[in-house]
């Protein structure tokens, strides 16, 4: 569900209904975030805080580039399954196509990465993830939900990544009809994970934000005003 209203109004409504908020990021700075780069992508998206009369926002500028901004802490999605955010895009990508690797770019996405748990893994996964930990110093995520603004209008509400069946794209907005407008979204992470993968999600997850255009070679500027993780009463 999307709302063309201010984040402050939505947040106030959540509190008035008795929602329990775990955290709310309003991007006064990026101290709680780290940037993650991809080895084969030399050009990186630029993430920064932008201050204006309406407050602070995250701005993500992509130009034939990709990198990921990741929240440093994990949270329990079974205890706090609800997420809300406000975003805006300056443009969508003409060459984007979520079904093809060559078109797998989004002007903005909110990325829920689920933590790998060795206790729940089989022998093959333990070997693969153990090797990755030796290389990168930490376990990679076991899978993800990507809440995306699709440049291309598509009939599906949930799309399998053309790169891996462990990632799903959940289409929240699509096309250019709302370009330049702030839009508030909300989702239930547990419900979406079960719809995507047919099973309960791992308990621990973290949040990522990405504006990528490395496949299409295009550029855009996108914004996130706030992200809130909470549970409904």
Image (cartoon, rainbow, N blue to C red):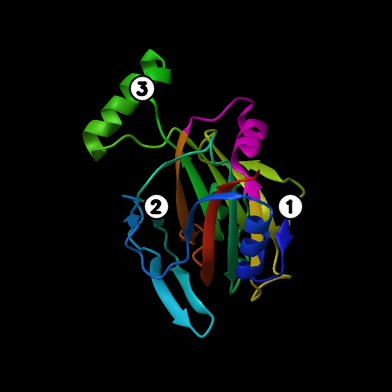
* Label 3 SS: helix
Q: Residue at 77% of width from left, 49% of height from top?
A: 155
At label 2, counting other C-alpha atoms closer than 10 Å, the crowd grade (few under 14, some 14-19, many 20 or more) is some
Q: Residue at 23% of width from left, 36% of height from top?
A: 135
Q: Earlier in the sequence, mark 2 or mark 3?
A: 2
Identify whether 212 is placed above or below 6.
above
**Quick one: which residue is furthest to the bottom in this view?**
53
Which one is in front in this view, the residue at disc 3 or the one at disc 1? 3
Q: Position of residue 102 (x, y in %)?
A: 54, 52
CA separation in Å, label 3 and label 1: 37 Å
CA separation in Å, label 2 and label 3: 22 Å
- Residue 218 in magenta stretch: no
Q: Residue at 53% of width from left, 68% of height from top?
A: 225
Identify whether 217 is placed above or below 41.
below
**Quick one: which residue is furthest to the right in this view?**
155
**Quick one: which residue is furthest to the top in this view?**
123
Indicate which disc residue 118 carries: 3
Identify whether 79 is placed above or below 60.
above
The residue under label 2 is 71
Q: Which residues are magenta?
A: 187-203
Q: Quadrant of the C terminus?
A: top right
Q: Nearer the viewer, residue 17 or 166?
A: 17
Q: Position of residue 69 (x, y in %)?
A: 40, 57
* Label 2 SS: strand
Q: Position of residue 62 (x, y in %)?
A: 45, 68
Q: Quick check: 175 left or right of 25?
A: right
Indicate which disc residue 154 carries: 1
Q: Quick check: 178 left or right of 169?
A: right
At label 3, counting other C-alpha atoms closer than 10 Å, the crowd grade (few under 14, some 14-19, many 20 or more) is some
């Amino acid at each position: 569900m999307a709302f063309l209203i201010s984040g402050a109004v939505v947040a106030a409504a959540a509190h008035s209904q008795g929602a329990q908020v775990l955290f709310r990021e309003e991007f006064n700075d990026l101290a709680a975030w780290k940037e993650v780069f991809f080895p084969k992508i030399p050009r990186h998206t630029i993430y920064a805080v932008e201050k204006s009369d309406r407050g602070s926002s995250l701005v993500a500028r992509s130009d034939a580039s990709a990198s990921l901004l990741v929240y440093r802490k994990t949270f329990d999605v079974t205890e706090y399954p609800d997420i809300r955010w406000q975003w805006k895009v300056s443009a969508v990508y003409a060459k984007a196509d979520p079904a093809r690797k060559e078109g797998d770019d989004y002007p903005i996405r909110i990325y829920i990465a689920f933590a790998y748990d060795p206790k729940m893994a089989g022998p093959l996964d333990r070997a693969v993830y153990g090797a990755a930990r030796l290389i990168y110093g930490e376990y990679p995520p076991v899978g993800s939900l990507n809440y995306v603004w699709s440049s291309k209008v598509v009939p599906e509400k949930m799309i399998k990544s053309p790169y891996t069946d462990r990632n799903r794209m959940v289409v929240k907005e699509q096309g250019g009809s709302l370009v330049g407008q702030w839009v508030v979204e909300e989702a239930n992470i547990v419900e979406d994970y079960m719809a995507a993968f047919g099973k309960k999600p791992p308990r621990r997850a973290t949040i990522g934000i990405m504006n990528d255009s490395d496949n299409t070679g295009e550029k855009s500027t996108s914004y996130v005003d706030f992200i809130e993780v909470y549970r409904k009463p």
